Amino acid sequence: MQGLFRRPSGVYFLRISVPISLRSIFGKCEVIASTGTTELSIAKMVAGAEAAQWRQRFFDAGRLSSLASTYMTNDQELIRIAQGHPTLHSGGHLTVTEAATACGLSPTVLLGEAAESRLSLFVRTGGTRGHMVPLDALELDDPEIGRAGGFVIPDTRRLPEDAVAHICRGMMRIPSSDLPGVATALLGSGEVFSVHAFEVTDSPGMIFIPSEGVSASLDRVEMSCTEVEVFRKSVAATIDPKRLREARTLRKDAVHAAAAVQGKKAHERLSTALAAYIQDGLRQKVAMESEITRIRNGCNLLIELEGDLPLAEIDTQTLRRFRDAKLSLVPADENKIRLKYHSETMAQSIKAVEGMHWPIMSVSERDKRMRWIGAWFKWLHKERWIAEDPAMGLRGESVLSKAERRDLKSDGRDDEARDVFTSDELKVIFSAPWFQTGKGKLTKAGTYRTYSPMRYWLPLLGLFSGGGRINELCQLHLDDVRQTANATWYVDINQEDADQRLKSKASRRIVPLHPILLELGFGKWHAALVEAGYTRLFPELKLDTEKGYGKAATKWFTQYMSSLGIPRDGTKAFHSFRHTYTNALPEDTPERIRKQLTGHTRGADVHDKTYRKDVEPELAAPYVNRLQVSLPVIAPFDIDAGLVAIKDALQRKNRGAGAQEDLGPQG
């Protein structure tokens, strides 16, 4: 046998060469393994089995190395994969998107592993009725391959006699035989579909068949933190140590460099910042040591559940994600959980009571902790540790998670998660000074510091262009705004350019512009931008690699709503323009046109979804033109002021490099 040799002791050894591409991973050029015997025939059998195991290790390492090289496109992603996230140590479950964020890999990678049955998928239920059925009572789907091929799931009216009525609560595992199909479906469209059988982890040998199919979608299917963490570690093990050291050095330098812009101590960790706040800020206001301890523990939840990050990495979205996805899982009376289940961290306590009916922390207590965290960051901003207060955009928002807000609705409809703007609210929104004068207010230095054309046109487009989602509008290129041969203005919402992306295929659509936009000067403004050499409708907006052009716009509109006194309880947001638009369309608008205008799936069958084309702008325009909402008097847009405001914004964007990235050949 190749590679087999005998040492002077008489014992046979196996020499296996490590592939050149994997030597940096295994840290050696060859593997020497003892067979433990002096008998040649036995040594050959042992060596054969050992060689097969090493070939499998090389294959797995090569596959993971390929994943790493494919998806770690920048140093930031490489570091995220290498260091992981505290959430993955909790032993609980996260949605696919949350798990991807925590481990540093994309949802596509995780679902690809699930499709190969290397990662499990789960659906969480609060109480689903059905039956527990012994696996032995079910017919095999393919007798030749046995249980690996799955089982034939009977109709609920034809269950075996051994079936027992059951209400399933907590986490239900999608059977391994169904993983390829489910994961592939999620990879394809992510649309809701039904699952008709589940494994229940604490009932081996049984399968749960719900009375009705349980809906599953990309935002509902979850993954095991433990499994994802094991996978992350295996991918991280393939990272070239030299490249990782270089990435960490570059990141450290970047964080310190950013401190000059983000604050003199933006490079400091959260734990250091909290200690300083307690000592130099909180103790000046609070005398009782017990209260100081409560506030310290409340603020420390951010560190424990998000990680001890540098201050420079904390933004409004990070705090919002912590509030909605992490703080909403914190159990009430957590000290009792530590006594009963011997947990040592909050993450362990969350895991210990997962699937039980243990109550979560009340809304008022969660709100109190967010106020403590807000006061902490306000102090850091005041003391110039950070240049901007990331908690400011959260003030006035509801601490309820999206799921909790939906549960408060009587019928639980998803479309109730956002409300329409009332006439009074629209009047307030569109009564800002720039709507009254058509331009912003100059500073004493003669520049537009707090105004850009986005503030004028974005809310109007949200209301009058199909209720466009904020990122859909922010990423529009000037050549996406067009006229037909009959002079009908419309926007083509698409993802044809590399910096554009849509929520789904159905979001691609053509939407006629409402006459009010043209009366206010939108067509003339578009022509002025083209003539000036710009390429995008909102050149002042900066592209975020994860959130697109809409990140800064969302932050602005959130703060704008808060400044107007409109309740920030999650029901009123920029997305509410979509609901306002839909409700304002004429009653006789055909359903297909209504769905086209708002970017929803057209029709119910394959013919409607695949083969029928969207109607031309001229056919949809009559319905759009009849859309009516009550607004205050709005002044036409001041084009000259708008061009100056954009130049001022570009001087601030990317430290003055904004003009280079947004101007065409004329720039």
Image (cartoon, rainbow, N blue to C red):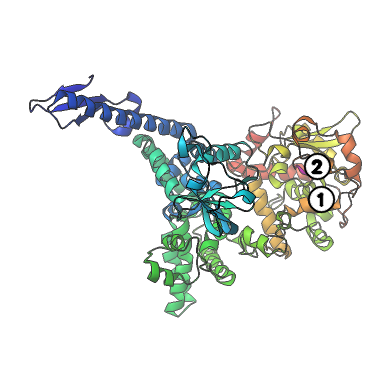
Q: Does 89 sit above or below residue 8?
A: below
Q: Nearer the viewer, residue 270 or 348?
A: 348
Q: Does 20 sit above or below residue 72?
A: above
Q: Gap between marks 1 and 2, in whole Å? A: 10 Å
| Left or right of 529, for residue 663 | left
**Dominant SS type (magenta):** helix
Q: Residues within 10 Å of mark 1 (few under 14, many from 20)?
A: many
Q: Residue 458: x percent and y percent?
A: 75, 47
Question: Going 89% across and 39% down the picture, which residue do you hit?
Answer: 621
Q: Residue 562: x percent and y percent?
A: 69, 62
List the single residue furthest toward the bottom.
288
Task: Give the amino acid type for the residue marked by disc 1 in the picture.
Answer: Tyr
Q: Nearer the viewer, residue 327 or 651?
A: 327
Q: Earlier in the sequence, mark 1 or mark 2?
A: 1
List the single residue furthest toward the front.
161
Pointer 1 residue: 581
> Is residue 597 shown in magenta?
yes
In the rendered image, the quadrant that contains the N terminus is top left
Q: Residue 619: x percent and y percent?
A: 89, 36
Task: Give the amino acid type for the residue marked by disc 2 in the picture.
Answer: Leu
In the rendered image, the quadrant that contains the C terminus is top right
Q: Magenta span covers which residues?
A: 595-599
Q: Is residue 23 visible?
A: no
Q: Residue 168: x percent and y percent?
A: 55, 58
Pointer 2 residue: 597
Q: Nearer the viewer, residue 340 or 371?
A: 340
Give the secondary structure at mark 1.
helix
Q: Does 138 sit above or below residue 631?
A: above
Assess whether mark 2 and mark 1 are in contact (beta carbons under 8 angstroms): yes
Determine the image quadrant of residue 278. bottom left
